Image: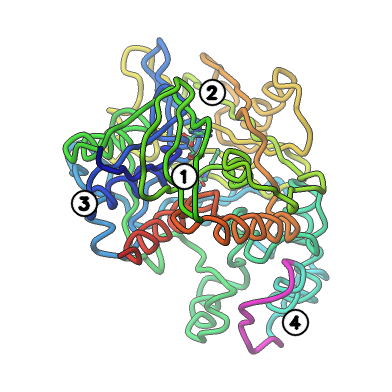
Amino acid sequence: MSKKIIVVGSGVAGILAAILLQKKFGNVYLIEQDKKIGGLFCSKKFNNGLTFDQGSHFIKATGIKKLDQIITLGINEKKWNILGNLKGASFFGSKLNSRSPFFDTRLLNRNIYKKGIKEILKIKKFFKTQKNLKDQIEKNFGSTFTKYIFDLVINKKSFRCDLKELDINSHYHFGLGRLLAFSSGEARKLKQNKVYDKKFSFHSYNEGQSSLKSYYPKKGGSEEWIKLLKKQLIKLKVKIITNTRVNKISHKNKKIKSITLNGGKKILCSKVFWTINPGLFLKLCELENKNRLNKKIKKIYTTLHHIAVNRAFLTDAQYIQCYDPNLNTYRVTLYPNINLDQKKSINKSKKLYHLTSEVISHKIPNIKFLEKKIINELYLMKIIPKNSQVKFKHSENLLNGIPIPTIDLKIQSQKIIKLAKNKIKNVYFLGKASGAYSTGLIMINAFNEVNKIK
Ligand SMILES: Cc1cc2nc3c(=O)[nH]c(=O)nc-3n(C[C@H](O)[C@H](O)[C@H](O)COP(=O)(O)OP(=O)(O)OC[C@H]3O[C@@H](n4cnc5c(N)ncnc54)[C@H](O)[C@@H]3O)c2cc1C
């Protein structure tokens, strides 16, 4: 019997790895515990005909030609919105800025703004690698903005975790890569300087267009992308096994020989690509794991509120980043605004305008109570008109709390992966299992990892 390549977990990481591995070696098995593939790229269609995403929304090109050819295969202008910079908006201090997703520092108290600007302008360098998030932010943005923006949004509003405990680059999850300041003309001028360009944003999403396109289907949700990728898997003859978990991993002389599925089926294999919890890998290999995540992992809970109203939104933003610490809303995605063919995305007979509001909580929330608050916040932020009525609502908790990206978690995960790779030579860790979070990074990592293998 020929040996197979096993990919465990069929999120973006697993699917891409399976396509690339099948092209390179053949004989790939993709194992998924759920009844469908796609992981956090999934959408739900309700009886009223509306589709809402239950995880990630947009698909974005990576800039790696060979990889982009795979991820955009089947995407065409007829069925897909091919987008430049997304129309991002932001909300803070009772102001909705429909032109920029970045934090508008001018909305801070005047003295704080002045002090913050003075500090940031004095920093003539862009510091890359740092000890922790606080260090990274303070060195690049100064202590005033660290306190009144980054600590406020990341710690106080969301994670309830000191910035010192967080891994570097965690601020990108919050859209806090750059700050908005000055007038639009002054910002444009300042951005000609390489260092300031990395710290300040333009005032409108229209400026500084990225050459990398984003994609969203004209009908359905982000899961349409998974359907396209699945077509590739099927065409390539990747064996997709859903509703199945790996129960046992047998290894000898530092090499995995076979995996056993929960139905009892044993598959001989030459390589395993693991995109799920690396601790589970050690457990199934029955390897001692002294580096167990012994400290309690800090988790956050994500709640999704899918809402439809009977009047058009008051903004043309495609998504809104809410920085206001007094509000529960984290981010809102407005589906009809994504559609270039707008009329098509509005439920015709019922004229419904639909959106998803994501909320981050540091403890398990009371979902019904939260739903009411979120609807009120949509009125308050002037996203939906006062005279609109909510015609549909559905809220859900994402089942597994997402771990907060602490340094502790990173170090301990790295130790587990190192231990696993010392003991087993033919295993590769991808996706969230490798510590990556953003879809782009996950896809690039999968591409590079598969490319390296002889
Ligand atoms: C609400 C939300 C919004 C997001 N927004 C963005 C965004 O704007 N930009 C961005 O870059 N990223 C975003 N992300 C993150 C991004 O979606 C994920 O990082 C990415 O999709 C993860 O891909 P993955 O393949 O590593 O894992 P997953 O998508 O989690 O896939 C893992 C798969 O493994 C399966 N599995 C788990 N255990 C087992 C087992 N024992 N046996 C078999 N199968 C198993 C799971 O069922 C799942 O299908 C968002 C995530 C969420 C939840």
Left or right: 401, with 304 as reference point: right
Label 4, label 1: how many angstroms apart (C-alpha)? 31 Å
Kind of residue sitting beneath label 2: Ile
Q: Which span is picked out in magenta? A: 122-133
Q: Report the quarter where the C terminus lies.
A: bottom left
Asked whether disc 3 touches disc 2, contact meaning CB atoms under 8 Å apart, the reply is: no
Left or right: 373, with 451 as reference point: right
Question: Which labelled disc corresponds to residue 23?
Answer: 3
Which comes sooner in the sequence, label 4 or label 1? Answer: 4
Left or right: 97, with 444 as reference point: right
Kind of residue sitting beneath label 1: Ala
Give the percent coordinates (x, y) of residue 264: 45, 22
Between residue 319 and residue 136, name the one nearer to us: 136
Give the percent coordinates (x, y) of residue 141: 70, 75
Question: Which labelled disc corresponds to residue 307?
Answer: 2
Where is 169 relative to 413, above or below?
below
Image color mode? rainbow
Label 1, label 3: how many angstroms apart (C-alpha)? 40 Å
Q: Secondary structure at mark 2?
A: strand
| Residue 145 sits in quarter | bottom right
Question: Which labelled disc corresponds to residue 118?
Answer: 4
